[in-house]
Amino acid sequence: MDHRPQAWGRPRDDVYGAYDGSYLQSGGPKTATQSPVVTGTSVVAIKYKDGVVIAADNLASYGSLARFTDVKRLRVFLGTSVVGFGGDVSDMQWLDRHLNELAIDESYDDEPSPSSLLSASPNKGHGKLNAANLHVYLQKLMYRRRNDFDPLWNQLLIAGLDAAGKPHLSSVDLRGTAFTSPSLATGFGAALAQPIMRRHAPTEEAAAALTREEAVGVVQECMKVLYYRDARSLDRYSIAVVTKEGVELKEDEQLERQSWAFAERIKGYGTQTV
Amino acid sequence: MAAMFSQNPVMNGPNYSFSDSPQTNAPEGAREHRFDPYTDNGGSTLAIAGADFAILAGDTRLTSGYSINSRHHPKVFKIGGTTADQHDATLAISVVGFAADGEALKERLDAICKMYRYRHGKPMSVKACAQRLSTILYQKRFFPYYSHAILGGLDEEGKGAVYSYDPVGSYEREQCRAGGAAASLIMPFLDNQVNFKNQYVPGSGEGHALQERERNPLSRNEVEVLVKDAFDGAVERHIEVGDGLQMMIITQDGIEEVLLPLKKD
């Protein structure tokens, strides 16, 4: 018999091995997201004449498992901007809550004055955070978190309008690297969708000549190519068009006119006899 | 007898205290992924000081790995103006390396130059700004700003001044300096074309008797052509350089900004 009272009623070391109490340690380094767990894949977006088109599929993967198939990865901010999230889904949800909080605070600060209500003010939404402001805010947030070694494991696309009312499209990643471009894509989209979008909008001027229908068409084409070739993607997706009229968000779109004819010739797709 | 069957570490006294239990739950070296706070965003910069001007230049490509993130992401900035548009700035800085750190560094130095201007009623001198930039970089000695900074302006005598830095703040005033991905391609070209290294007066002798070509400052036009040539050469031989060439020309009359196209392949 074990004569030590501390051991009584506990699993025997010689049977189960010594107790592993490492997860109980409260001292030691703070744990943070060291790698993403449930992830979203590409987000694609392109600027056009009077706004931005942005899309992302509705899948959240757990490694290679298609775990959640109705996750909305486009979030609207203040009814004027859209943020598209790639990367870790829990960090996306944290950011979404954070942005909602910010939007509420901003709405309190931006209460319309009685005079502007009377004069049916033309500068509606003036003083609100626009997409360019939101971009800077998110860049500072992501960079701060990387400096704390507690990164938010996302790449974000921010779509909307800048202070001058021109289309704004920009990106921020988990290290706080921020940039803008006529078209942007995260994850696999950077390799598969960007070349397609750059064919239509190689420069800011070319993007400013695109119509809404063309831009939506290009983005839909990109989503299709991504579904063909990105194994962590889905044929259900969300697409948003951001203009000065506001945000038109459709969250349950189905990829149309798919053609898998090419698959016959490729080993690894479908049934192969040899 | 018990020791024969026990798999446990020695139990010479009371055991089962949580703090004594083994800490490792994974084999050594099994940690799969640690967050790396740095990346290299490519690009290259270049600065040349003239007799009464200084030119800072950089390409506008932003890369990560083999992808081009943006074709227009400037690396050269005016700093220390009284307003956000920097119309009355007297200094410029170029940052290349990790873009987020470069941006943060530039913004901190800009804020400091602005505070100086508000407090003293005059713009900061390049010399003072150069020392301050070194201090900022060294303050983050153990988590550095991963960028190669070059500061440009006109000194107290109105001569062009270029200060170049390493990521942890050691700095030096120089006639010219290339930084970033294609620095090793551009710098030897500059040594030869700006400082006339390995250039001798023809027929002046043999071996050590050769007379070096006299060094005199280049004109602004010559330098602008030199910068364009340096970048055209770098674009040809380095995949992370290209798209656009941004130049800041600092003179007594202010800072002039020029944007030229580079190859986009």
Image: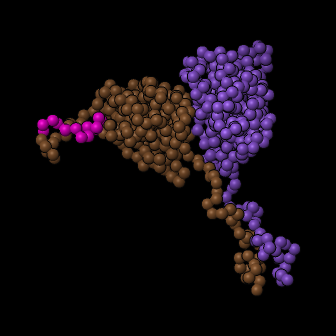
Chain colours: A purple, B brown
Quadrant of the image for the C terminus of chain A?
top right
Q: Looking at the image, which residue is at 86% across and 76% down?
A: A8
Q: Is residue B72 magenta?
A: no
The residue at the far right in this view is: A9
Q: Looking at the image, which residue is at 44% across and 40% down?
A: B180
Which is more toward the observer, B140 or A29?
A29
Q: Is residue B196 magenta?
A: yes
Examine the rendering and report whether any part of residue A259 can be seen.
yes
Asked if A249 appears above or below A212 in the picture, the reply is: below
Q: Looking at the image, which residue is at 71% across and 76% down?
A: B9
Q: Position of residue A258 (x, y in %)?
A: 72, 25
Q: Position of residue B158 (x, y in %)?
A: 34, 32
Q: Quadrant of residue A53?
A: top right
| Start-end of magenta stretch | B192-204
Quadrant of the image for the N terminus of chain A?
bottom right
In the displayed structure image, the side of residue A201 where residue B156 appears, left or right: left
Q: Quadrant of residue A143?
A: top right
Which is more toward the observer, A25 or A196?
A196
